[in-house]
Amino acid sequence: MALIACRECSKQYSDSASACPQCGARVKKRRLWIWIPLSIPIAFILFAVLRTRAPDEDEKIRARDAIDLCWSKQKTKSFDPSTAQFVARACETMEEDFKTKYHVAP
Ligand SMILES: [Zn+2]
């Protein structure tokens, strides 16, 4: 038990009292319990935010699409042999990057 000073009349009294015995001012209780029900939606929001951002699924899909696009362009466009080879090498580089990043074949 400790003594606290009243914020109204500054008289000291026990912190176990719910109001000042002198002037009747209510003790401002630190309402920690309010964070218990609040923490659940907060946790959900955080989880949702992290889920939409963190998992590199989106990035992975985009990278895979880019590789697909690269190869389809390389095959369909009528490049001259050296350009075709250059594009193919670019596609292969993208595949290599994908493999080093995700440890799976695209
Ligand atoms: Zn008081």
Image (spheres, rainbow, N blue to C red):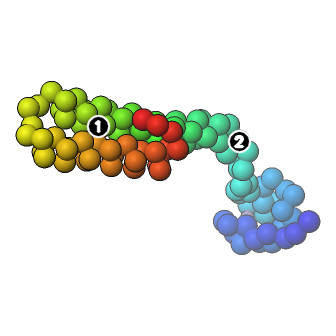
Viewer-side residue, 25 vs 40: 40
Viewer-side residue, 58 vs 2: 58
Q: Amino acid at mark 2?
A: Ile
Please tell me whether mark 2 sits on a helix, a strand or a loop. helix
Q: Quadrant of the N terminus?
A: bottom right
Q: Position of residue 54 (x, y in %)?
A: 49, 44
Q: Residue at x 71, y 72 (%)?
A: 10
**In the displayed structure, does residue 9 sit left or right of residue 103?**
right
User: In the rendered image, which quarter is residue 4 located in?
Assistant: bottom right
Tags 2 and 1 in contact by the CB under 8 Å rule? no
**71 lies above or below 97:** above
The circle drawn on residue 66 is 1
Find ligand 1 in the image and state its quadrant.
bottom right
**In the displayed structure, does residue 11 sit left or right of residue 55?**
right
Q: Residue at x 32, y 44 (%)?
A: 92
User: In the rendered image, which quarter is residue 42 located in?
Assistant: top right
Q: Position of residue 50 (x, y in %)?
A: 51, 42
Q: Amino acid at mark 1?
A: Ala
Q: Quadrant of the C terminus?
A: top left
Residue ID for mark 2: 36
Q: Position of residue 82 (x, y in %)?
A: 13, 46
Please tell me whether mark 1 sits on a helix, a strand or a loop. helix
